[in-house]
Amino acid sequence: MANPNANFTDVIATTLQGYSGRLADNITKHNALLRCISDKGNVTPATGRDIVQELEYAENATVKWYAGYETLDTDPSDTFTAAEFQYKQMAGNVVISGLEQVQNSGKEAVHNLVKSRIKNLDKSLRNALAGALYANGTGNDGKEIGGLQLLVADTGLGIVGGIDASANAFWQNQVVSTAAAPAATNIQTSMNSLWMKCIRGADKPDIVVADANYFRAYMESLQVNQRFTSENKASAGFMNLMFMDAPVFYDDQCPENHLYMLNTDYIFLRPAKGREFVPLSEKASVSQDAIIIPVVWAGNMTVSNRALQGVLFTTPAAG
């Protein structure tokens, strides 16, 4: 049977296809952490049964000092392995009722209606992904991505990407915990301790994200002339302070009384190829007078070096 309103659905499909890439771009640009990951070129499509993240876990054991004709070490040296992450799926729908189809019959009216629906969906998808960046992977019955509470865990341990950190010290992230609430008088000492733990040679954190309590404490600890921002991040519309040479951002999605120091050279967002906020074909509701067009995403957040990531948090008071 022919579609009774092909003109309407054609306009919807065309409009959605035009917005597909823009949706992914908008979501990346509206979160400081995602923006930083994207700027490093670490929003990379994934293919295959699982998301495979190669990582370097040991130095080359054949390196040695030698003299003259001394025999060199030619034994194979295992230096690389891979973490494997599962795909997680998210979707939202553009829904248009039959009455709205009647009321918006012209192409321009349809286009404007769809734009308003997409704007709302954009905001909803953005909020869902922003919250999931800090998830531990167990939300929504394990359907949510594994965010910072998994990748940079309060314990420093956990099974991440199929690798058990309790049995592999190289896979443990850095942790500083304090019983005292964050305040201007203690915040910099705690941050200094975590910073030193996260440095390996030239590798160091390039972004700090904090909840309201930690961000406020750090802001109040600074002299007025120290409260400067990173020009490239500030120009992107994000408010930030600086610690060492890393921008410090407040994120309202960050868990309470937590601050993360991250090296985004080793943190990735891996969307499944072909599922990067892509609209699917129109679906007709079986029990309602409406058409539905799903917009889907699949992928996960991954890490290739946990030892260079750190978390500072306040332990909950007993009782």
Image (tube, rainbow, N blue to C red):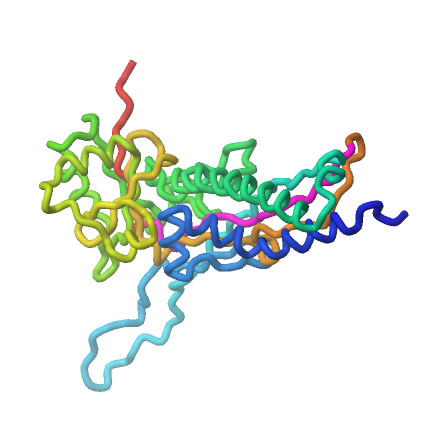
Residue 41 placed where, x, y %? 41, 62
**Relative height, residue 28 to residue 54 (above, below):** above
Residue 198 placed where, x, y %? 24, 50
Farthest residue, direction top: 319
Residue 69 placed where, x, y %? 23, 86
Residue 89, picture quadrant: top right
Q: Is residue 209 left or right of residue 46?
A: left
Front in this rendered view, residue 263 or 39: 39
Tell me the residue at 20%/85% (across/down).
Answer: 68
Front in this rendered view, residue 13 or 319: 13
Front in this rendered view, residue 11 or 204: 11
Tell me the residue at 28%/57% (across/down).
Answer: 232
Q: Quadrant of the C terminus?
A: top left
Q: Which residues are magenta?
A: 289-306
Based on the picture, tell me whether residue 297 belongs to the magenta stretch. Answer: yes
Tell me the residue at 21%/60% (across/down).
Answer: 201
Farthest residue, direction right: 1
Front in this rendered view, residue 241 or 49: 241
